[in-house]
Image (cartoon, grey):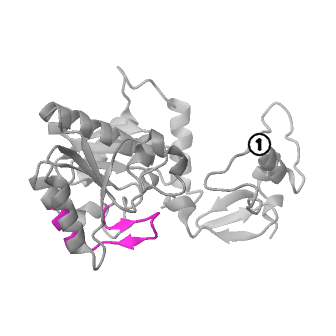
Amino acid sequence: MDASAQHPASEEPGATGGGAPRKAGSSSIRELDRRHIWHPFTQAALSEPPIPIVSAQGCTLMAEDGRRYIDAIGSWWVNLHGHGHPRIAKAIAEQAQQLEHVIFAGFTHGPAATLASRLAKVLPDPLTRIFYSDNGSTAVEVALKMALQLGQRQSPQRTRILALEGGYHGDTFGAMAVSARDAFTAPFFPYLFPVEYIPAPLPGAEQLALDSLRQALSGQQVAVLVYEPLVQGASGMRMMAPDALEALLRLAKDQGVLLLADEVMTGFGRTGSLFASEQMGPVPDFVAMSKGLTGGAMAMGATATSEAVSGC
């Protein structure tokens, strides 16, 4: 079936109202893309041209040439509910006609308050405070800022940051700093703040991880430990047993270290429970969320913490 003949997205990108949109040739999307778009994680000189997609439904992507593709990666692990979900599309359309945005300093609105309330009900106690941001990277950075500010109020020297080797937490500078230092981040090493890494408690490396954490904690003044609960996604889906990770987290918590769970990928049912953190203790002090939060329908991130942290 020729999808491009049935979907208005096959018209030239950028066509707007005020007259009939101009029809696109078969190469128009690719040509405009080639001339103007810089794709992430892509070496343009070596990569094949991107596949122009004109519409999507459920898990199926319809290309400009009529071919269909299964979106098996969920558009970077984002699309939990399928493309073109009618209930989501209807809700967005109705809300856009009522209120699309308002400055959030000094104002609030029903959808934001309702979503925060619903998140608080499904997150582990005592995570009842929600801070909204733009995406997963900023949700992590918001949590880092909260943790460092709280740590310094407790002790001016509590500034050290720990993270697990092989982790991925985003591509803004703070998120890069706590992620694995690799080829993608190498050009920015001189600009990233210091982070100490300990081995992830992978099968066979549980004791090494615990011993490394004990050594790191011996110097005191650690503010926060950043981790992906249960699975390190961008590192190759490296799995950690709940009990192994729990032992690590409890050791850190016993020393007064704040716990930052990056649930951007694992949140909203990816690991069986609604949040991966539910499968182990202790409850993290911060949970970073995005991706499944909107199912890719819009850019949004959220950082959850407790009343005790927000009131400091």
Residue 197 shows in this picture: yes
Q: Residue at x 85, y 50 (%)?
A: 28
Q: Residue furthest bottom?
A: 204
- Amino acid type of the residue that numbered disc 1 sits on in the rendered structure: His
> The C terminus lies in which quarter of the figure?
top left
What is the span of residues highlighted in magenta in the rendered image?
A: 229-250
Residue 188 appears at what percent x and percent y? 51, 44
Position of residue 149 relative to residue 165, above or below, is: above
Helix, strand or loop at mark 1: helix
Magenta-drawn stretch contains 232: yes
Determine whether, in the image, residue 261 is placed left or right of residue 104: left
Determine whether, in the image, residue 54 is placed left or right of residue 165: right
Determine whether, in the image, residue 18 is placed left or right of residue 118: right
For the image shown, how many numbered marks are present on the structure? Answer: 1
Q: Residues within 10 Å of mark 1 (few under 14, many from 20)?
A: few
> The N terminus lies in which quarter of the figure?
bottom right
Magenta-drawn stretch contains 223: no
Q: Nearer the viewer, residue 118 or 13?
A: 13
Q: Residue furthest left?
A: 254
Q: Nearer the viewer, residue 136 or 248?
A: 248
Q: Residue at x 43, y 71 (%)?
A: 237
Q: Residue furthest top?
A: 106
Residue 312 shows in this picture: no
Q: Which residue is mark 1?
A: 36
Q: Residue at x 30, y 47 (%)?
A: 118
Residue 242 appears at what percent x and percent y? 24, 71
Q: Nearer the viewer, residue 280 or 67?
A: 280
